[in-house]
Image (cartoon, rainbow, N blue to C red):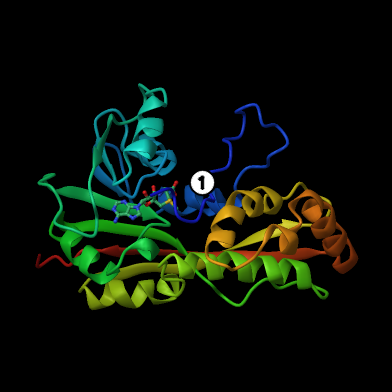
Amino acid sequence: MMCPDDRDAAPEPGSGADAVPENPANGPSSRFFAAVGIVPGMRVLDIGCGNGDLSRFVAGLAGPGGEVVALDRSDDVLASARAAKADPRAAPIRYRTADLAGVLPDLGRFDAIVGRRVLMYLPDAAATIARLSDLARPGSIMAFQEHGRAGLPAGLGDLPLHGRLYDWMWTTVAAEGGDTGLALRLASLMRAAGHRVETARSEGILLEAGEPSFLPTLARVMLPRMQAHGVATAEDMDPDTLAQRLEAEHLAAGGTIVWDLAFLVSARIGAGR
Ligand SMILES: C[S@@+](CC[C@H](N)C(=O)[O-])C[C@H]1O[C@@H](n2cnc3c(N)ncnc32)[C@H](O)[C@@H]1O
């Protein structure tokens, strides 16, 4: 299956698609994951690694003396992750195919387990967290960035088009089996698993009037899935004029739009494990 929210399906910045702005949903990751306690020499597991963007970031934190194991069930995304150039200043990354919904392969023990936008796509995130906990050394770190449906967008004026797009996107994710409320339950899930939550905060993904927006790209990439689930048609969206209409609506409202929230939760694995 493709990356289910397709935020990561857009071209990489610098890939030649110069008009496409960077995915703003990834903005909080470097601030959050850099602060959870990953230090040089650690063994880190990245679950649902996709194209390896987060794996490479944590590999930088773990340094050449550390190791990153990155799991995904999609061989296609793993192929693109493996194609990225290795950084000699970072930990080596071992990419492996695995289904997080099932029994995990024997991977040894880890000092940190991380993931971004993956728990929400699992049929039973609590069960996966429990299985992952068995791979964690006592006192190690678990840190996740998840996104969810959070009653947005919010801004200074009426935003009916932005609101429609938000609704289409999250309704599509839900129709595909994504748990759109998982992000809001994440801290309680970690506590219920017996872990000590150290960080539970959110960071707004903001859109500024007059700045290049990622939304038209995201909408275009998600349109076939919206159509497949009967959520929106090409006529409803009119992708050829969408960028212009979003921009006009934003300029009329002015100011900042809070488009999305990244929920950022880190915890220490119970010392008794
Ligand atoms: C939205 S993408 C996020 C990718 C990456 N974590 C990132 O933020 O750049 C979700 C990823 O989770 C993977 N995934 C979803 N369900 C999975 C499962 N049951 N087992 C393993 N990987 C899974 C998908 O293949 C996809 O690559």
Which residue is depicted at the point 59% across and 68% down? 231
Task: Check mark 1 vs ligand 1: CB closer than 8 Å? yes or no.
Answer: yes
Q: Which of 243/176 is in front?
A: 176
Q: Is residue 50 visible?
A: yes
Image position of 136 with respect to 260: above or below? above
Which residue is depicted at the point 56% across and 50% down? 27
Looking at the image, residue 181 sits to the left or right of residue 254; the answer is left
Name the spot of residue 266 as percent of width and height, x first.
35, 62
Looking at the image, residue 209 sits to the left or right of residue 269; the answer is right
Image position of 9 with respect to 219: above or below? above
Image position of 24 with respect to 258: above or below? above
Element at label 1: loop
Q: Which amino acid, by three-letter code, is at mark 1?
A: Asp
Name the spot of residue 243 as percent of width and height, x first.
78, 52
Name the spot of residue 65 as percent of width and height, x first.
24, 30
Q: Residues within 10 Å of mark 1 (few under 14, many from 20)?
A: some
Looking at the image, residue 215 sits to the left or right of residue 253; the answer is left
> Which quadrant of the structure image shows residue 72?
top left
Which residue is depicted at the point 81% across and 73% down? 156
Task: Give the total of numbered labels.
Answer: 1
> Which quadrant of the structure image shows residue 117?
bottom left
User: Label 1: which residue?
Assistant: 8
Looking at the image, residue 234 sits to the left or right of residue 250; the answer is left
Q: Residue furthest right?
A: 252
Q: Is residue 42 visible?
A: no
Quadrant of the snapshot with the C terminus: bottom left
Q: Which of 44/181 is in front?
A: 181
Which residue is depicted at the point 83% across and 74% down? 157
Name the spot of residue 261 as percent of width and height, x first.
56, 66
Q: Which of 165/199 is in front?
A: 165
